[in-house]
Amino acid sequence: MPNRNSIKSAFESMMFVWGEPLDVKTAAEVVNIDKKTAYEYFKELKQEYNDGERGLAVRETDGAFQFVTRAENFDYLQRLCTPVKEKRLSQAALEVLAIIAYRQPVTKGEIDVIRGVKCERVVEGLMRKGLVEETGRSSAIGRPVLYGTTRNFLRQFDLESLRDLPDIDDIEDAIHESAPDESPDGAEQITFLK
Amino acid sequence: MSYKVKIDNFEGPFDLLCYLIESAEMNIYDIRVSQITTQYLSYIDEMRLRDPALGGEFMVLAATLIELKSKMLLPRSGPAGDRDEDDPRNELVMKLLEYRKFKSAAAFLSEREERAGFLFEKPGEDMQTYTNDRDEYLRMDPERFARAFRSFLSGKQRVEEMRNIYERTERQRETVESRISLITGMFALKKTRKLGFYEFLKAQNDRFEKVLTFIALLEMIRGRAVTVKQRGSFAEITVELCGGKEMSLYAKQE
């Protein structure tokens, strides 16, 4: 049986070739070890990469691992290849996505109630972007469709799992602490000035 | 005090209300309903000027606020200690707090999204160069290939058939008017004023053609361009040209 280091080395090569997040389960089957040990090895690899001064980092998403570039190098990469920046989500889309992320599985009706606006079109847009998906049907009258977030959502927002989302009841404090003097629009500044 | 602020696109009625409460530096648990209602209404008035199709959701909250305002005028029953529990504002406050949580969650996500944008990943390697399977389609067995080709041919045939039908329906677009001029033309050609009905149908095997001729004749009878006579049931129908100005009417139409 191959030793710890050679398996980790194999995982490294596999992640390099795979590109997409590599499932621990898939990788474990390839080298014929149990999933738990494989996960441990991946975690070690992640630690090693992220501690060292490497240009690559290992990102974990929903029990899968992949190589990504280090955020600090973004400027250089941009100068090298001017990557197309993906359009950011609109405020409406972010709000609906937040509700789905925290309340999943959730129906459109429940989302509408929280925001006071119909969310039909926004949910469709999020589905097209692969950020949310139908997860089943509610047993309520009319059996409305239930929505939840996808693995792609976790990846696009750099979250290891849904547990990475801050507690919804503390979130306002968390946000205000992290960005104390940030005001999203000019209108708010007027209140300070008066 | 009053001040003019840029009217942003508010994501919904709650968004606008939250903004107004924050701007007025009001405690969300102690909303001054009358003041906020006035502000809210003037905002949606202005927003409607810009966007006449402003969502009905904004109106719904306006109605709720006005109702709340009137309820606030009524003295509340019960001892003073219970006041908090039957405060008519409670339901709205709960909703606003709930909404505000998710608005913060959206801000959190927005920040994550921006940060995640600094990371690049790469697509999986194209391993075909290494797998020797590049010419896979050539290894298909001949029988399967022949079957695929046959089904392609029969598919093509079906399309051909469909096209024939389609073209025939195109041809049948012939109108009653064009048929009438054809009939008058037959009279002119044979230099006669009388013709048997079956003369007209001779060259026509198609049911559609026959019906069209029949309708054209009925139309001509109605316009008094021709008269028809029939001796008895199932006997030959004689069609006789009337002549005169009605005929020129049809000629002109054509």
Image (cartoon, coloured by chain):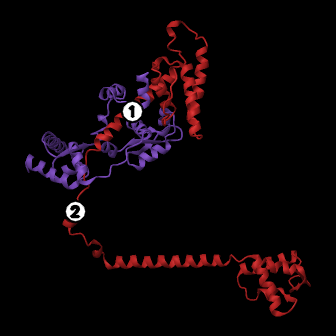
Chain colours: A purple, B red
Judge left or right: residue A12 versus residue B184: left
Q: Residues within 10 Å of mark 1 (few under 14, many from 20)?
A: few
Task: Give percent across and percent down for residue B76.
Answer: 58, 11
Judge left or right: residue B79 versus residue A12: right
Instruction: Give me the disc on residue A184.
Output: 1
Q: Does any portion of residue A118 appear in the rendered image?
A: yes
Task: Give percent across and percent down for residue B51.
Answer: 57, 40
Chain assignment, label 1: A
Task: Give percent across and percent down for residue B93.
Answer: 48, 22
Quarter of the figure with the C terminus of chain B: bottom right
Q: What number of labels is visible?
A: 2
Q: Does any portion of residue A24 appear in the rendered image?
A: no
Q: Is residue B64 above or below residue B147?
A: above
Q: Residue at x 20, y 45 (%)?
A: A73
Instruction: Select label 2 or label 1 by which is in front.
Output: 1
Q: Residue at x 80, y 84 (%)?
A: B183
Q: Which residue is mark 2?
A: B127
Q: Residue at x 52, y 11 (%)?
A: B83
Q: Amino acid at mark 1?
A: Pro
Q: Are marks 2 and 1 on the same chain?
A: no
